Amino acid sequence: MKMKRILYVALVCSMALCSCSKEDDTIGDGTPQGEQPGGEDNELPPGMREDVFTVTLPQAGALPSLISPEDKYRITELKVVGDINGTDFRLLRDMAGRDENGAPTQGVLGYLDLSEANVVAGGTPYYKDEITDNNGLGSHAFFQCGALTTIFLPDGLSFEGGSFDYGMEGEPTDGVFAGCTGLLTVSLGKGLRQMPACSFWGCSNLSSISLPDTVEEIGARAFMGCSTLKDIMIPEGVISIGIEAFKNCYSLSSVSLPQSLRVILVGAFQGCNQLNSIVISDSVPFIDDSVFEGCGSLKTVKLPGKLESLRPNCFMGCRNLESINLPKGVTVIGNSAFYGCESLTSLDLPETVSMIEENAFALCKGLESIVLPKSLSSIHKNVFSYCENLSSVKIPEGVTFIGIGMFSGCRSLEELDLPKSIDRISDQAFMNSGLKKIAIPDNVMYIGDDAFYWCENLTSVTLPEELQTIGQRAFWNCGSLSSLELPDKVTLIGADAFANTGLATLNMPNSVEAIGERLFSGCTKLVSVTLSESLQVLPEAMFDGCALETLTIPEGVVQINNAFSFVTSLKSLYFLSQNPPVGTFNIGEETIVYVPKGRVEAYKSQFMWSDFTDRICEME
């Protein structure tokens, strides 16, 4: 009874935030409250206090016998000395806000000093079926203990890693301190070698932490979501930083990386929006995907000299990145590596770069010029898409194609010299760009869909002799393009290829065998067209809105599908075929149809001609 009375008095003193007498406040084996090893001159770690209620355990598992059920939800500050096991952790969790099943409790324990505790195996499970190991904290030791604000851990301790899984709402499912949203201060103790996965995931109020110099590895999502963490010094000896280790540490503005570092894995600093500079030592040969993605304040980066590739999304969304020096030896710039780096105005690519993958520099709105190295052999799609200020690009010999959307949206790009090695202009290659003129190299046989779509300033295009295919909408809405010479090897022209252009005349070579719908739709200035003798079908709405007054239909055309609808200017329509084409046929009220001699009745007898038999005449 005397022991219980002493404990009760100590609890009341602690709750009243009063400093209790060291002589009166003892428990267990009689250890005075607040007494520290090493005598009065021993310096305390930052944040550690002497005026804290202390319990010294006579044996592991004894804590529940020393703290009564009615008192466990009153204690706000506690120091535990001696061996502790699963039974003790079960109570500590309960006091810090979570029971053994993870359910919330009324616990208010905020300050916990375990610096003189010794974790041993055994006892009852403290979380579902988890029990303690010698000198080890399991992955749910303090998981989601929201009342906990300060903790001091003993030397020589190790952590068990979390499962790296997301919960239903994107929250952690385990991790030693994961989800401890009230945690402000942590002292990890000496000897810790590994900071395992998910250790502090979601500790949103943890503003600083000091890692022991024994740490060699920082695990996946170890500090993910520590949104108030401002700075961290990663000690010498750390070899790897794991997947998303510091992801969404929104306040992190300063990181010191050690010379010992070898690997930085996927998304390690992703979303660290306050990080403004980073220096990576030459010891790092590999930086993984998305490592600095979304670091919106990042301005300067020093990359390691041994780096061989920039992985996908590496600096994606670093909108304030002004300059970066790529080391010699880099061979690949990965997908979206600099996507959305709006402040990047220029970039020197080393001569070792052989491949630039898709979206690598897309939406780099400040990029004005770039010289591509002679070593380059492959450029993938959308590489410079919507680089609105890009006005100068030098492409080396050896590049064989302009990738999909490569210069789409480059409104300041007015001219471009393409190397002779180019044999293909891919879909959307120059879509909505500022091009005024371009000469397409002799080896190009294919111009893709939407290649020059909406290039409204384009006035001059030189097509190569080897060209065979012009894709759909290839020159759609090129309103300033008034003339175009089609080479003699073109066989296919896609739908809408010349729609809404400024073309006035066009001679279609006899090599053209097929054309798409609405080919000249909206060409309000088009007054003269010579059609290919190889055509068999005139497709839907082919001449809608054109200014044609006369048109000759080649002898080989056997089908017409409303090709002349809404061509109100058409006065004379000449058919060279002895047999009238089939299909659907609408012409203006003033259009006169001329057919070969002796074939008037043959044409009139066809159903599709029945509405204008009075306007079918014989050619002279």
Image (cartoon, rainbow, N blue to C red):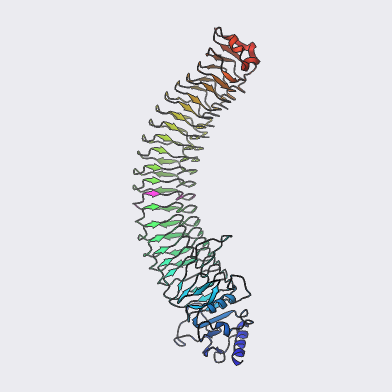
Q: Position of residue 300 (x, y in %)?
A: 44, 56
Q: Is residue 6 left or right of residue 31?
A: right
Which residue is located at x 34 percent, y 44 percent? 375
> How many numbered tags mark residues here?
0
Q: Quadrant of the C terminus?
A: top right
> Which residue is more in the foreground, 335 or 602?
602
The quarter of the picture where residue 615 lies is top right
* Residue 332 within the magenta-colored segment of the rendering: yes
| Magenta stretch, overall SS | loop
Q: Is residue 303 visible?
A: no
Q: Which quadrant holds the N terminus?
A: bottom right
> Would you say residue 416 sits in the magenta stretch?
no
Magenta residues (range): 326-340
| Residue at point 50%, 85% (across, down) | 59
> Is residue 207 visible in the rendered structure shown here?
yes
Q: Is residue 417 left or right of residue 179?
A: left
Query: From the viewer's perspective, is residue 498 above or below residue 181?
Result: above
Residue 24, x across and y down, in percent: 57, 91
Residue 245 placed where, x, y %?
Answer: 47, 62
Tell which of 574 and 367 is nearer to you: 574
Frontmost residue, 262 versus 302: 262
Percent of width and height locating residue 425: 44, 35
